[in-house]
Each structure stands twice: as C-alpha cells, then as structure tokens.
Amino acid sequence: MDTKKKVLGEFERLRDRYIPLMERRTGLNLGQVEIKSLIEENCKDDLLGRTMEIKALKRMGVVKPTVLYNPVEETIQVPTFLWNELDKSNNQEADEIMIHELTHHVWTKTPNRIPLQSVPSVVGEGFAVYGEQHWFADFLPAKRNLTPKSNYHPDYIVGEEWVRKLVEEYGDQILLKIPARYGEFVTWAEGEK
C-alpha cells in the first residue's frame, strides 16, 4: 500500500474512533468529516487569515506535522507527503492531531457559534489544544505522554491557558459556550495576543 493511502486510511480510522466519543461527551451531532490529502503544491493555509508554510513549520519543529481543519468544507486535510513517520511503531501523535482537528469541528458544530474563520487564531487554536490536552485527553491511548507545550506555537499556549482559566472559573459547561460567546470572555487586549 502506498504511503498516501496508508496515511489517509489511518486518519479515517482515527476519525471514526473519536467522533462517537466526542459526540457522547459534547451532546453534539458532529456528522461526518471528510479526510482529504493536502497536496504539496497547495501548502499554504489561508483559511483562517494567515499563511503557514507547512514544510517550514515542520523543519522548525515548532508544531507537529500540520494537519488542517477547513471549517468551510468541514474537512481535515492531511499533508500525506510529510507523514512517513506513521511507519514508526507505536506512533500516537496522529491520535492527538485527530482530536485537535476534531475539536475545531466541535466548534463548527456548536449551535449559534461564531464562524471559526472569524475568530483570532489564538482563540480557535487554544480551544483545540484544550480539547486535545484536557477535554478529550482521556480518549487517547493509555500510557502515553501528551505533546509538551513547548512544541506549540506561543499563540496556541496563550489560547489554551485562556480556555483552561475559563474552565477553572465556570466549569466544563463553559466549553460549549465559548464558540458562540468567546468575545464575552476575552481578557487580553487585541494587541497583546
């Protein structure tokens, strides 16, 4: 089996594993999310108002191999040409990435939400990191270490800390309110994020 089919198949398997668990946890109908290959020639993400060179990010080691959630198409786009590390045994990074991207999908499926592409990346990414590191972390395979925060872009860390503080103050029920009302909870000045 070629690498592209193997990688897409692995992400489809993970999607099918985590969607029902996340639906039960959130009470949302997440529907189906298509897994697509992100081709090398289209390695820029302009969906959320920023451009990221996927290869450069991977080389810098700042973030995991970049998998993109497209909130307009409700698809997860996998740069299969970067994913030969799935050939390694016991690689569980794909599980974390799938939960992260599906947490973006939770935002998209929350009633009365502000469109994900309309919110600052610090909010959207912080929400997804919180999902991956806390809200849905118990779904991940046992006996594993979560990706250290130092591997994330600083905005992701600021956003995750913001979500974590909201949960500490208001409880878990705040998580499904953030997508519709995040502006009520923002505590940093626009220029400080």
Image: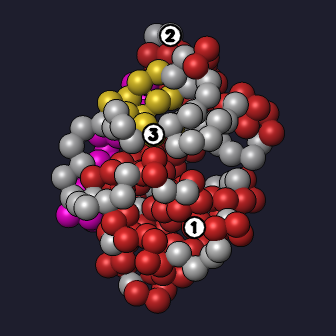
First along the sequence among labels 3 and 2: 2
Residue 13 lies, in percent from the top left, at 35, 34
Label 2 to label 1, Cα distance in Å?
36 Å
Q: Main secondary structure of the magenta part?
A: helix
Residue 161 lies, in percent from the top left, at 60, 73
Quadrant of the rendered structure where residue 126 is? Answer: bottom right
Q: Residue at x 61, y 28 (%)?
A: 44
Q: Nearer the viewer, residue 22 or 28?
A: 28
Q: Is residue 13 visible?
A: no
Q: Residue at x 55, y 57 (%)?
A: 120
First along the sequence among labels 2 and 1: 2
Label 1 to label 3, Cα distance in Å?
18 Å
First along the sequence among labels 1 and 3: 3
- Residue sitting farthest toward the bottom: 169
Mark 3 or 2: in front is 3
The residue indicated by pointer 1 is: 160
Q: Which mark is residue 69?
A: 3
Q: Is residue 109 visible?
A: yes
Residue interval drawn in magenta = 8-27
Crowd rating for badge 1 (residues with CA inside 10 Å; few <14, some 14–19, many 20+): many
Q: Nearer the viewer, residue 80 or 112?
A: 112
Mark 2 or 1: in front is 1
Q: In what element is the residue under mark 1?
A: helix
Q: In what element is the residue under mark 2?
A: loop
39 relative to 21 in the view: left or right: right
- Residue sitting farthest toward the right: 60
Pointers 1 and 3 in contact (C-beta within 8 Å): no
Q: Which mark is residue 2?
A: 2
Residue 164 lies, in percent from the top left, at 53, 76
Q: Residue at x 46, y 10 (%)?
A: 1
